[in-house]
Image (cartoon, helix red, strand yellow):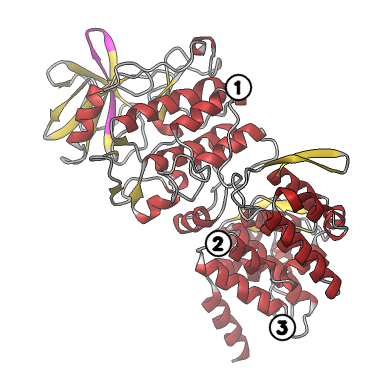
Amino acid sequence: MINKTEINPNINSTVINSEISKATVLNPSLAAFTVKSATAGTLIAGKYEIVKPLNVSTGEADIYICKYNNNEYVAKIYRRQRAVKSEVITVLKSLNSPYIAPVFDTGIHNNLPFEILPYYKNGSLQGKKFTMEQLKNTIIPCINEALKVLHQNDIIHKDLKPSNIMLLDNNKGVAIIDFGISSVVEEGNTVLVTQTGMTPEYSAPETFRNLFLEESDYYSFGITLYELYCGYTPYKNMNTEEIAQFTAVQRIPFPNDMPRELQELISAVTYFDITNRNKKTNPNRRWTYTEVDNWCKGKKQVIPGEGMGFGVEKTIPPYTFLEKAYNDIPSLITALASNWNNGKKQLYRGLLSAFFRDLNPKIAEYCMVAEEDAAQTTGKDDIIFWNLLYKIYPELSGFYWMGQIYESLPALGRDMLEKLWKNDKSNYSYWNSILENKLLTDYLTKVKSKNENLIAAASALETSHNTGKRHKRDTMMNYYTMAYLLSGQKLFAIGDRRLKNVFELTAYMKELLDSSYEEFEEFCHSIIDYDDTLDVQLEAWLLALGKRKELDFWRHSLNV
C-alpha cells in the first residue's frame, strides 16, 4: 500500500489559475434549491447535515454540500442501490494521496448508497484552459502520480476527463474524483466489462471492444490534456461510432500552436497499438507512468511510432539537406517530404542510397530499386518517391504527398472542407492527384488500417473519379465527398454558419422566409437550380448524413 505520494518539491510554487473564482465542487455555479432526495437540514449517517444541493449534471447521483464539525463536505447519494462497487470503495478508503479525492465515509441513506467526499471550492477543470507551464509543472505530474497510486492498487478509473479532475483549494494541484464506473483488477488480469458510463470522446480504442487497461486511463489522460490546452477535444462534432473508427486507425491531429513537446506527450499516451504493452524495451507502446514521469523531468525518449525501423535506432549520422543537418530518420523523412522536389533529387541523384549503403544496407537497397524504377518508367517519379518514404520509415503515420504534410486523413479532410467552403481552388490539382493515383487506399494499406468501411468507401470514390469522362460538377462532387469521408465532419456551410443536420437547415430556411421571401427564394435557388440540379455541397452533405434513399426518392419523383 502507498502511504504518501510526492511529485515535485517545487510544486507549491506553481499556481494553476490565479483567476479562478469561488466555485462548487463540480460546477462553478450553485443552483437554487430544488427538490432532491434529501432536504436542507437532513442528517446523513446521523452527523453530516445537508446544507444545499449542487446543480450537477449527473445521471447516477444527487450531490449536496453538507457540514460536520464546522467542516464542509460533499455528500454523493446514488440513485441505484448497487451503483457503488464495494471492492472499489474498500481500496479507495485505504489510499493516501493528495491527488486522489479521499472517501471519508460511506453507508446507506434512505436505502441508497452514499459517499462523503471533500468539498473542492475551486471546482473542476471542465471548461478551463491552461498554459504549457501550468500543465507541465502541476497538472500533468499530479494526475500521473494519482494514476500511479490507483494502478498500483489495481484500480482502473475508466472515465478520466476534465470534469473528474478538481482544483485543490490552494490552486497548486489537482485531484481525481468520481470512481463510479471504476474497476478492480484481480491478480494483474485485464478487465472485460460493459461500456456503461464511459465518455466516448475520452475513451481509448480498446475500450470500444470492452477492454479496459491501465493504458486506457492514460489515453483518457492524453485527450484531457488536449482539451485543457485547446479548449476542445480532437473529436468534437463526431458521434460514438465515428470516434471509435477514428481512434482505431489514426493518430491525433494537433493545432499548429500546440508546443511540439506537448504534442509528443499526447501522441505517446494516446498511441493506439497496445500489442507491445508488456514489452517494456519496445518503444512502440503506449506511455504510462514511467515515461510520463521522464517527460516531466525533461528526459529524451523515443516517441511510439517513431522509434525502431529495421532493427536500427532512429538516430543516424548527420545528413545534410538544404543546409540543415538531420540526425534521425523521422525528421529526415519529414524534411524530404516537405521539400518534395528537392527530396526527389536526393533520391534520383543517388545521394540517399550512398548515405545508407554502409549504415543500413536494406534502406540503401530500397533507394537503389527506386532509382532503377524511375529510370525505366515515365511520369512515376512522385509515386516512386512516395512509396520510398514509407519504406524507409514504415511507422510513418502522417499523409505525406507532394510537399504537403497532414497528421492524418481527418486532418486532410478538414483542410479540404475549409478550402471548399472558402472557394479556395489552390489545392484542386493536389486533390485530383490523390484520387488519380489512388493514394487514399494505398495510404490506408500502408498504415495497416482496420477500418474496412473507410477502405471500401475510399476505393469506390477513387474508382468513380477515374472512370469515364468527368464533368466539372462530378469532380467537385468527388472533392466534397472525399472531404466529408475523411474529416468525419458533417457540417453544411452557409457563409459563416455551420449546420449540423437537416433540422437546422429547415430552421435556417424558416428564418429566411420569416425575414424576407426574396432572400428565401434566392437561397432555395442557390441549393436547387432551376433545372432541379442540387448544389454539390448540399448533395455531398446529405449523402454524408446517410440520406441516399431520400435523395433517390426525390429524384424519382421528379421523373414521375
Give the magenta range.
62-71
Quarter of the image where the C terminus is located: bottom right
Quarter of the image where the N terminus is located: top left
Camera-side residue: 65 or 387? 387
Going from the N terminus, do you reach mark 2 or mark 3 first? Answer: 2
Report the residue at 73% width, 79% height from top.
466
Q: Which residue is mark 2?
A: 448
Residue 323: x %, y % from top left: 88, 39
Q: Is residue 537 left or right of residue 351?
A: left
Amino acid at circle 3: Thr
What is the secondary structure assignment of the residue under circle 3?
loop
What is the secondary structure assignment of the residue under circle 1?
helix
Amino acid at circle 2: Lys
Crowding near the residue tagged with mark 1, few <14, some 14–19, many ≥20 C-alpha atoms within 10 Å:
few
Residue 90: x %, y % from top left: 19, 29
Q: Which residue is mark 1?
A: 133
Pointers 1 and 3 in contact (C-beta within 8 Å): no
Residue 20: x %, y % from top left: 51, 18
Tell me the distance, in whole angstroms, between the alpha carbons under discs 2 and 3: 26 Å
